[in-house]
Amino acid sequence: MTTTIAKRQNGNVPATFGNVVDNIFQNSLHRFFDDHFFTVGKPLHNEVVPVNVRENNQGYDIEVIAPGCRKDAFKVNVNGNLLTIGYEQQEERTEQQEKNEWRRTEYQRHSFTRTFTLDDSVDVNGIQAGYKDGILHIHLPKNEKAKEVSKTIEIQ
């Protein structure tokens, strides 16, 4: 149980229980709706699409989380030493969608790009990409000179 101590308002009259409860309720309500989690229907600005990057002896694997995206809307390009992953969302509304507007929308698909700087260990000609189960998988193989060589040296 929480006990609230009422402060005096204007230095002499104690706050009434009703005023304290009203203030607590109003402040909580304002914080609830001001929280960024509840910015319903607004696109996320300055958000970075989350990725996982793994390295092993054979190369690098990048996983981009992108549920509900169309495979043909992705673009993966290498220009110099920059790998750019992009998704262009085309909003096409049918007549049926126009008639049946959503009452509430809590997410929107939107366009994004991510750029990674590649070092000279990546074999650019061997890069492969695929999209499955809402995740874009990109494999960047290492070139032969960058692969670790494991060898046991015989002592003579």
Image (cartoon, rainbow, N blue to C red):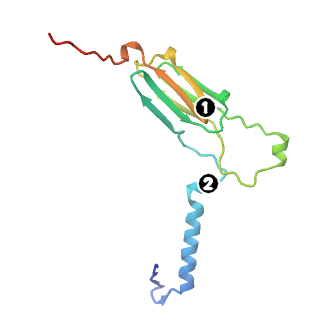
Mark 1, other Cα within 10 Å: few <14 / some 14–19 / many ≥20: few
Residue lying farthest to the top in this orientation: 156
Residue, x 40% and y 26% (percent of image)? 56
Sequence-wise, the earlier of marks 2 and 1 is 2
Secondary structure state at the residue bearing disc 1:
strand
For image coordinates 16% across by 13% down, the residue present is 155
The answer to whether 42 appears left or right of 51 in the picture is right
- Which element carries disc 2, helix, strand or loop? loop
Residue 25 numbered mark, or none: none
Q: Is residue 122 visible?
A: yes
Residue wearing tag 2: 39
Instruction: Please determine whether, in this image, residue 85 is positioned above or below residue 8.
Output: above
The residue at which mark 1 appears reads as: 132
Quadrant where the C terminus sits is: top left
Structural distance between the alpha carbons of marks 2 and 1? 29 Å
Amino acid residing under circle 1: Lys
Residue depicted at x 85% and y 41%: 95
